[in-house]
Image: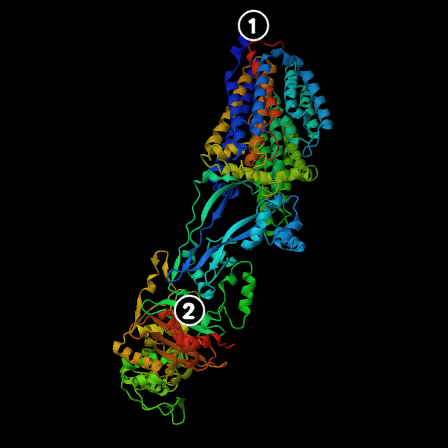
Amino acid sequence: MRQRENVLRMIDWLTIGLYLLLVVFGWFTIYAASYDFDNSSWIDFSARHGKQLIWIAFALVLAVLVLLIDSKFYNNFAYVFYALMIGLLIVTIFVAPDVKGSHSWIRIGSFQIQPAEFAKYATLLCLAKFMSSYQFTIQNKRNLLLSLFIIFLPALIIIAQSETGSALVFFSLLLVLFREGMNGIVLVLGALAVLFFILVLRFNNLPDVGDTSELYGFICAFVVACLVAVLFVYLYTRDKICVRALLVSGGIIWLVGGIVHYFYPGILLTWVAYVQIGITMMMLLGWSFRVRRKAYFMVALFLVATIGLAMTADYAFNKVLAPHQQIRIKIVLGLEDDPQGAGYNVRQSQIAIGSGGVTGKGYLNGTQTKLNYVPEQDTDFIFCTIGEEHGFLGSSLFVIVYAFFMIRLIYIAERQRSAFSRIYGYGLVSIFLFHFFINLGMVTGITPVIGIPLPFISYGGSSLWGFTIMLFTFIRLDANRMEVLQHR
Amino acid sequence: MQYKRKHQDSRSRQIVIAMLVVLVAVLFILRLFSLQVLNDTYKDSADSNAFLRKTIYPSRGLILDRDGRLVVSNQPVYDVMMVMREMVNFDTLSFCEVMNISKAGFDERIKEIKNRRKNPAYSRYTPQVFIPQISFEEYGLLQEKLFRFPGIFVQQRVARQYTLPCAALQIGSLGEVTQRQLQEDSYYKRGDHKGQSGIEKQYEEALRGQKGVEILLRDVHGRIKGKYNDGANDIAPIPGKNLQLGMDLELQAYGEQLMQGKMGSIVAIEPKTGEILAMVSAPSFDPALLVGRERSQNYAQLSSDETKPLFNRPVMAQYPPGSTFKLVQALIMQQEGIFTRNTLLPCKKGYYYTRTRKVGCHDHKSPIDLPTSIETSCNAYYCYGMHRMLDERLDKYGSVQGAYNVWRDYVFGMGFGDELGIDYPGEKGGVVYRSSTYDKIYGKRGWRSSTIISISIGQGELLATPLQIANLAAFIANKGYFYTPHLVRMVGNDSVDVQYRTPHKVTIKDAYFDVVIEGMYRAVKKGTARFGQIPGVEFCGKTGTAQNPHGDDHSIFMGFAPKDDPQIAIAVYVENSGFGATWAVPIASLMIEKYLHRTIDPSRKAIEQRMMEKSFY
């Protein structure tokens, strides 16, 4: 009894307020997105907004249930959950019917559920439990590898369900490893890899450049890599002589190469870039032998990896990715312009958002989304309706509120005394951030179209319940923050 | 110590993650700013996507005659429309039976509709025209059984309807806008109809009114989802203005009857206003031929007809004015002091301008005075006049060229040469050479009156349209001024443009007109036009013959009546009918009688019948 009171007092009502605000706003947006000019009843359980009302009611029941459960339960049963979920994911591959090529929905009666939405939850619990276990340190290779295994096992199974979008969400959990002490350089290198990948795809074989023998993608990637290498050398060794030597040699190579290219166009700039990255690499290797420091060697290795990545990027893009994925990426990179084809969604969603202007068209007055110009207007592309009807002011406010919600979660995570709760909290933030970034990014045309919902806003029961359970578990853990759990 | 460092490290990692969240938010706000604030193009795309601006066509203005009788009105026509998507379980055979088409014809038409090259706007969801403009009877038949044909409906449109089958060329017709017209005037959209000829074209802007717009919301499949903003942004159409013509519909129809089987023109003008009472181009045709489904077929047939029914002779055909031009000469010569009423001149069956070369003339008494020269249409008289004008006034005008230019100014002042400027598209002017043109042909000192003597009697390098000759009749009737002839009298409630209400004057003394009118009166009374007398009407006129190098000469008559209070000025041309008196005079007199008396005297019924029955082709 005493504990119950305590829990109610310790609950973070601000977060619950933000949650309710987002869910209610989401429902109104779904109503607007599926608004029928002829039949505008607010409560109609055959319509999408009517169904969403049921999902919300159910979600609130789930939220209360989650708050009622003792916080130790989550810690104790984390591994069991995880094991069950892995089993369920595998079963789903074989049981689920084919929906647009993906096998991710289980049908129970007239009711469909997507286990992948709940796999995030189980993975989060499991990861939190493992990383908060006694004597866990991320510097231990075995611990690190096991953590990565926990993260990527469900992701692989979900890829097998052909739900690549949901699988990518698990990558966001790397942010948790970073918070728990993993070297930040890993994330930086990862970001650089993505950058080089994009540069190579974007600028190799530009459609509007006549001379196709120049590989501008390689040139950009190599030059950026050399500059990053110089930065690394400076940050890790503070060796100004080496930095100066690298910069001067690079400058001379480009000057000479540029002049030669000008008079003999047969000498390609691509070759100059190869020469430059090659010489930079040789200089770093020489330096590492001369002063006997590993750092130079590692930077040289980074350059080798860059060349390897760049060379395989084209190959990977053409041979590994499925054609529809290639096209989606090309559209985002501006390599393909096909407003009626695969670029249609992105184009239409930008038209819808752009047409909102500064102040928007007003609630229920959006025309693009309601008239079905934007596909999946109430699920993945729900933000179009917000952009169209509430304009720049409204949608910016939405972005700010959502960011504040995530910052609030970081704040709560940091005040935890228990590592389990803190790790869980950061995992939650990472997942929200990833969904938020990719969803808004694809709708506004800055990331590829990866079909993942906007948490609490998009239509759909599984997604709403999944995120509700995850969030309220955290709120429940937070309510017990004063009781230090047994571990660490 | 170690704990402290660890704590600091955690703190900075926490800040990095929080900064990441802030960075993402800032990125999106910038992106939204560029999409929603900096860029306007998306707004336009959105509008054209989702709004269906449905055009509401205004009713086209009616056309009335001078007495308010309806000449052109609107009639409903019916297009059979189909929506492909809704045509499930379609009973093609019974539909073909009702529409009286073959199954093959049906399939052919469906194929045409679905061909996106020919029909770029095709969609399974939107109505397509299956058969345009079915008749009311066909519509009735279909309407009864319409419920059996899902996806088929009938859309009402408006087409032109004509009270009488006459004045086809003058009124003109409507046709679908051409590619060029679409580019020139953004008012029109593909498939719109506009006036393509005649008054319909000339007064298109007044007749068409202003289209309205109804803004509907349309979904991605093109289906209508309701009215935008409850119609608050709609624009109501403005109906077209009615036109009132100067034309007397009855007179027009009568003129076309008289000209049956002939080629030629009648132009009748009210001298006091310049309003055209009738403008007949023969052969004529029923304007209804150019309405509806058979339009293009009929048009092709008319344009390949050898008698050129689509050639609007009154304003487009150029003929030598012949003897009617002597009236112009008589006026100029008097004003210039070359002739007086009583100037006597000899005619020895012609005018000898060298010892052996002459302009011939027919047999009549000699010498004669000016009115008699008009009555008998003497050629020699006017050759003398032209000789004196050009060759004997060097003291006054310095040169032949100088004198010719003075003469030419008079001629232009009476409406010859350039187009008159009638409110009808495609009017042609006449021809009156410049002195510089003669200089080019003969050299500066190489020509005098004898060189160009045939123009003194309206032949040679002179051409005029029937409209110009009718205008000359009006000019003489008015004794010195004319209004630019025009077909339309009122546009809506406004008078016609001010250019048609401004008189054109030439300074010639009234007395000189009296002399000419006396000659014209005597021509009808006992001279060349004596077959044209109308009981109880004092009627003045002048015959003419336009030489035709291709066959029989064209018969011309121009005149006006009554003599002292002219109500009607007229010019009649009958092609290939020989001497002016035989055909043109009686037709003109019947027209005048019809206009002044509204009926033909029984004594003249025989002439009327003879005129109507005669055919020259």
Residue under pointer 2: B279
Query: Quarter of the image containing the N terminus of chain B?
Result: top right
Task: Give the Cα separation between the discs numbered 1 and 2.
Answer: 109 Å
Identify which residue, B167 or B229, lies in the foreground. Answer: B167
Name the amino acid type tagged 2: Met
In-image side of B494 versus B34 (left or right): left
Crowdedness near tag 2: few (<14), some (14–19) or many (≥20) residues, C-alpha within 10 Å: many
Element on which disc 1 rests: loop
Q: For numbered disc 2, what is the local secondary structure?
A: strand
Q: Position of residue B207 (x, y in %)?
A: 42, 56
Is residue A67 at least partly visible in the picture?
yes
Q: The disc labelled 1 sits on which kind of residue?
A: Met
Foreground residue among B297 and B328:
B297
* B433 relative position to B117: left or right: left
Which of pointers 1 and 2 indicates the residue nearer the eye?
Answer: 2
Residue ranking furthest to the bottom: B355
Q: Position of residue A62 (x, y in %)?
A: 59, 18
* Chain letter behind tag 1: A
Identify the image quadrant of residue B587. Answer: bottom left
Where's residue A465, x and y in %? 60, 22
Residue at the limit of the structure toward the front, as seen here: B602
Front in this rendered view, residue A6 or B505? B505
Neighbours of disc 1 within 10 Å: few (<14), some (14-19), many (20+): few
Residue B557's label in the rendered image is none
Q: Which residue is mark 1?
A: A1
Describe residue A126's horizontal placement relative to residue A354 as left or right: right
- The residue located at (36%, 90%) in the rendering is B364
